[in-house]
Amino acid sequence: MRISLAKLLLNNPSILLLDEPTNHLDIESLIWVENYLKAYQGAIVMVSHDRSFLDNITERTVEISLGNVTEYSGNYSFYKREREVRKELLENQFNNQQSYLKQQEKFIERFRYKATKSRQVQSRIKLLDKIDLVELEDEEATVNFNFPPATHSGKISLEISELTKSYDGTFNVLENIDLIIPRGEKIAFVGVNGAGKSTLMRIIAGIEKYEGEVKLGHLAEIKFYAQNQAEELDSAKTVLQTMEEAARGDIIKNLRSILGSFLFRGDDVFKKVGVLSGGEKSRLALAKMLIEPSNFLVFDEPTNHLDMKSKEVLMNALQKYEGTVVIVSHDREFIDGIVDKVIEVKNKKIRIYFGNATDYLKS
C-alpha cells in the first residue's frame, strides 16, 4: 500500500479516490498511511470499513442507503451519533403524523353519511390525499449472535516451548518462542507484514510444520479462520446449504438472521457458492466457522471483507464468547473491543503488552 500510494502521489493529484485502503496493511503501515493522509493537501474520497481510520482522517461522511444519499458534516463517529438523532426525529414525526391521520380518519368514518358534515368530510379527505407521508427506513433487526455450546477445556489452552520456524532450512522467521495461553484469554498478534504472524497462527492451528513443542490444552478444540478460508467452501452448494451442514441445535432456526448480518439477504441465501465474489465467500466462510462448536478460536485478518454491521456482530459475539480467542488484525477498533493482551511479533521474537491496541500503540 505504501508503494502504491507513493506512486499515486508522484502525479501530484488534486483528489485521491481510495477503495478500502487499509485492507492487508499491518498496523505500522496503517499508521503511516493515516498520518500521510492527514497532512495531504488535496481532496480525499474513500470507501472504508475501518472506523478508527475514518475517524482520524475524514471531515464529511456520505451514507448511501435504500437508493438515497445523505451527507453528514463530520467523521464516522459524528455520523453515527447524528444518524441516531435524525432517526429519533423521524420516528417522532412518523408517530405524530400517524396519530393525526387516525384522528382525521375517525372523523371521516363517523360523519361520512351525515349531510350536515359532508363538506367537512370531503375537505378532510382531500387534505389526507395531499399529505406527504413520513416513511421510516427499513432496518433489519439487530442480530444477537450466540456461539453454540462447546466443551469446557482445561486451564491452559495452549503452551508453546522453544518454537522455531524456518523456510527451506535457511531463514528463521520465528526463533525460540515460549508462550502460554490460558483458557478464556483474548489476544491480538500484531507486527509488520512478513514478521511471522500468519505463520504463527497456522502453527497454533496445527497446519504448519515447526521445530519445538506446541501443546494443545486438555479438551481444547481449535477453529481457524485463515485469509484463504473461502477456498475450502464447496462451490456446488448454496449459501444456506453451506450453513446448514455446519449448524447444530437451536442455532439452526437463526441461520437466516445470521446470514443477514453477514450481508446474505433474501434470495442471496440460495446462490451457489461458485458464483459468489471473493468477499462474499470470505464472509460466508467466517459465518460458517462461527456456528461450529469450539472453545478456542484463531483468526487471521477476519475483518478484511466485512462491512461495519457485520464487523459489529462479530465483535459483540466475541465479547460474550467464553472461550479463548487469538486474532491477527490491523483493525484498532475491532481489537480494542475484544482483547486484553497484545503480542508483537518482531525480529523473530514475541513481546507481550497488557491491554488493547490503543494501549499498545501508546507504549
Image (cartoon, grey):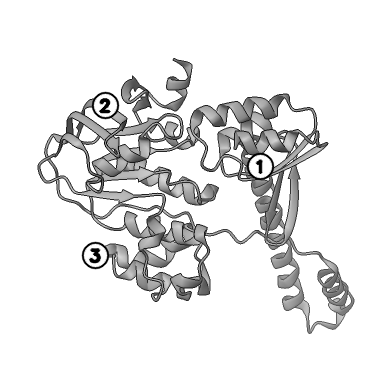
| Residue 85: mark | 1
Marks 2 and 3 sit apart, C-alpha to C-alpha, by: 43 Å
The reply to whether dot 1 and dot 3 touch (C-beta < 8 Å) is no
Marks 1 and 3 sit apart, C-alpha to C-alpha, by: 39 Å
**Image mark count:** 3
The residue mark sitting in front, 1 or 2, is 2
Q: Quadrant of the N terminus?
A: top right
What x and y, as percent, mark residue 312? 47, 45
User: Label 3: few (<14), some or many (≥20) within 10 Å?
Assistant: few
The answer to whether 173 appears left or right of 259 in the picture is left
Q: Nearer the viewer, residue 218 or 8?
A: 8
**SS category of the residue bearing label 3:** helix
Indicate whether 187 appears above or below 314.
Answer: above
**Counting residues from the N terminus, which is met first, the one under dot 1 or under dot 2?**
1
**Counting residues from the N terminus, which is met first, the one under dot 1 or under dot 3?**
1
What x and y, as percent, mark residue 266? 52, 71
What x and y, as percent, mark residue 301? 43, 43
Three-letter code, disc 1: Val
Q: Quadrant of residue 292?
A: bottom left
**Counting residues from the N terminus, which is met first, the one under dot 2 or under dot 3?**
2
Indicate whether 269 appears above or below 13.
Answer: below
Three-letter code, disc 2: Glu
| Residue 175: mark | 2
Q: Residue at x 68, y 33 (%)?
A: 6
| Residue 128: mark | none
Q: Quadrant of residue 59?
A: top right
Residue at the spot of label 3? 249
The answer to whether 281 appears left or right of 208 in the picture is right
